[in-house]
Image: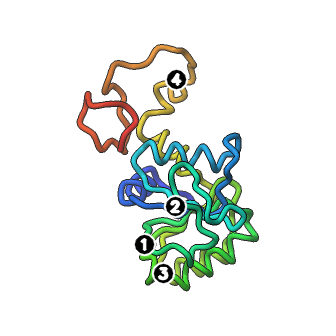
């Protein structure tokens, strides 16, 4: 199982603008729903993919039945399915690489498929497994840190604006918390 440096994760998240999220749910208590919502709030365009919800609208975006139905470029494919299903999704992403332009395959927490990752890397994708972009973004930009996680002390006192900014800040100091 590979490890990923903070620099690698930050570089990927800074370079991504549009994400195809495969396996997203319309249920607001499901992790995929709030990951999609969080990433949208951070400025990412998230295109939902779920055959059971195809044609419906989810968080302002039309849901697609498959990656093949997406008719615009995406930077990253985020897989919210189990490890076995990830192989088929990776194969579809490889087949559509030129059409979609994706450069990154991201497999969510507990999603590990070494064979699929090797196929994706051989096809020129960068692969991240067993990680959540919401958690990584929050950890690196300071959204999680302001709650005391990095200090191992939980309190309700927020740091001064701009204090303790992480590696993913896109905004100048003092312009807001939790932005790339």
- Residue under the image location 30 percent in, 44 percent down: 170
Which badge, 4 or 1, is on the more N-terminal residue? 1
Residue behind mark 3: 97
Question: Is residue 128 in view from this perspective?
Answer: no
**Location of residue 29 by image quarter:** top right
Q: CA distance from mark 3 to mark 2?
A: 16 Å
- Residue under the image location 62 percent in, 73 percent down: 66
What secondary structure is marked by label 4? loop
Number of the front mark, 4 or 3: 3
Evaluate if marks 4 and 3 touch, with contact meaning CB atoms under 8 Å apart.
no
Quarter placement of the N terminus: bottom right
- Residue under the image location 57 percent in, 74 percent down: 67
Which badge, 1 or 2, is on the more N-terminal residue? 2
Which badge, 3 or 2, is on the more N-terminal residue? 2
| Foreground of the two, 37 or 83 | 37
Number of the front mark, 4 or 1: 1
Q: CA distance from mark 1 to mark 2?
A: 10 Å
Residue 133 in the image: above or below residue 144: below
Residue 5 in the image: above or below residue 50: above
Quarter placement of the C terminus: top left
Q: CA distance from mark 4 to mark 1?
A: 40 Å
- Residue 27 x/y as whole percent: 70, 46
Q: Which mark is residue 47?
A: 2
Residue behind mark 1: 72
Taking 157 as reference, is 152 left or right?
Answer: right
| Foreground of the two, 64 or 180 | 64
Q: Residues within 10 Å of mark 3 (few under 14, many from 20)?
A: some
Evaluate if marks 4 and 1 touch, with contact meaning CB atoms under 8 Å apart.
no
Q: Residues within 10 Å of mark 4 (few under 14, many from 20)?
A: some
């Amino acid at each position: 199982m590979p490890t990923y440096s903070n620099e690698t994760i930050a570089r990927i998240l800074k370079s991504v603008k549009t994400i195809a999220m495969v396996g997203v749910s319309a249920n607001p208590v499901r992790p995929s729903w709030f990951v999609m919502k969080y990433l949208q709030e951070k400025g990412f365009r998230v295109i939902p993919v779920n055959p059971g919800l195809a044609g419906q609208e989810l968080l302002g975006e039309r849901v697609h039945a498959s990656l093949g139905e997406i008719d615009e470029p995406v930077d990253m494919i985020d897989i919210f399915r189990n490890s076995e299903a990830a192989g088929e999704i990776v194969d579809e992403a490889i087949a559509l690489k030129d059409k979609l332009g994706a450069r990154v395959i991201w497999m969510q927490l507990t999603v590990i498929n070494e064979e699929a990752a090797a196929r994706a890397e051989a096809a020129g994708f960068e692969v991240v497994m067993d990680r959540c972009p919401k958690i990584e973004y929050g950890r690196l930009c300071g959204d999680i840190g302001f709650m005391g996680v990095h200090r191992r002390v939980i309190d309700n006192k927020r740091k001064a604006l701009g204090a303790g900014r992480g590696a993913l800040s896109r905004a100048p100091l003092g312009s807001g918390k939790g932005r790339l």
